[in-house]
Image (cartoon, grey):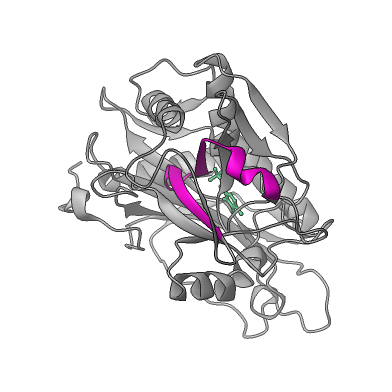
Amino acid sequence: MAKKNIDWGNLSFGYIKTDKRYVSNYSDGKWDDGAIIEDDMITMSECACVLQYAQTIFEGLKAYTTEDGRIVIFRPDLNAERLANSSRRMEMPVFPEDRFVDAVAQTVKANADYVPPYGTGATLYVRPYMFGINPVIGVKPADDFQFRVFTTPVGPYFKGGAKPITIKISDFDRAAPHGTGNIKAGLNYAMSLHAIVTAHNEGFAENMYLDAQTRTKVEETGGANFLFITKDNKVVTPKSNSILPSITRRSLMYVAKEYLGLEVEEREVYLEELGDFAECGLCGTAAVISPVGKIVDHGKEICFPSGMEKMGPTTQKLYDTLTGIQMGRIEAPEGWIKVIE
Ligand SMILES: *Cc1c(COP(=O)(O)O)cnc(C)c1O
């Protein structure tokens, strides 16, 4: 085994084909045994349900090398559970949660040469997904499904340190009440593309979406949950049924309470109280936390006291503690780290 000849420190967040991937097929009401294969191409009918009616869901997690040289993945059982929840909402068969974790582990192991070395800031991004594959023209769920896992090495999210970003309040909505905002489905991303292209064209890094019903409460961005720090150092995250339950956010809330002794609160967060917070960050697997320095609400600027130069102090502590746990420098809670052997 030899690591691939890749300039780990200069990788971007883009797709690079790796050698192996996992596939399992569902037909006649059951999943087959699944296998690691080499072919990265998928052949399907022109009328496949995923192509016509977007019956597809996914997960995202990372494999990385710890300080002591082990390859690990972070809380894959929660990705398994979340994919199962997405499956039920999308009328797709559940891929058994223990098999999900095993499939991810097998895929990472098969691509071990692509797991970036410790200290490079790069990681091996793991993408499990499932889609309806048989032809469907009258609207209904597919009968046959494919579950796959591929990996791709990705660079450090922030090259040269995390600089706070400026985001805008979007005029588009991400998710309806009682809709699909709380599951990880491609459809939630398809409809966010126009909103993010618009935001980027206007010079903003991300969109802050509000609740679609009243447009007074904070939901999340296209792909990350919000964390706010109050001036008296409480950690607050928005509560809503249409937010995707981020594993990073749930882990950070636990770390805030149990490792840093901070008060934590999951509650409705109103647009009009944003100016009262001391710090703001976006959390998700890719960046862990991206600090937000400024939110622009139709020309009105909300600037956090933490400024535009660096992460706020509490956000930084949260970031350091969680990444310390992930990299094996700080003892992890029971069951958070799965070693790939
Ligand atoms: C995946 C995702 C997140 C982040 O979840 P993690 O489990 O922390 O990676 C947040 N919001 C949306 C909409 C997502 O799809």
Front in this rendered view, residue 340 or 274: 274
Left or right: 132 with respect to 288?
Answer: right
Front in this rendered view, residue 189 or 126: 189
Residue 211 lies, in percent from the top left, at 75, 56
Q: Quadrant of residue 52?
A: bottom right
Residue 115 lies, in percent from the top left, at 30, 43
Q: Is residue 43 above or below residue 61?
A: below
Residue at 29 percent across and 51 percent down: it is 155
Left or right: 327 with respect to 67?
Answer: right
Count of residue discs: 0
Residue at 70 percent across and 33 percent down: it is 266
Q: Is residue 291 magenta?
A: yes
Q: Is residue 140 above or below residue 307?
A: below
* Quarter of the image with the C terminus in it: top left
* Quarter of the image with the N terminus in it: top left
Left or right: 21 with respect to 68?
Answer: right
Residue 236 lies, in percent from the top left, at 63, 33
Residue 161 lies, in percent from the top left, at 28, 43
Front in this rendered view, residue 322 or 308: 308
Q: Quadrant of residue 315?
A: top left
Residue at 53 percent across and 30 percent down: it is 252
Magenta span: predominant SS is strand
Front in this rendered view, residue 30 or 83: 83
Residue at 44 percent across and 35 percent down: it is 73
Q: Magenta residues?
A: 272-296
Q: Is residue 141 in sight in this rendering?
A: yes
Q: Is residue 4 in sight in this rendering?
A: no
Q: Is residue 179 magenta?
A: no
Q: Quadrant of residue 274?
A: top right
User: Looking at the image, which residue sits at the far front?
Assistant: 300
Q: Is residue 254 above or below residue 245?
A: above
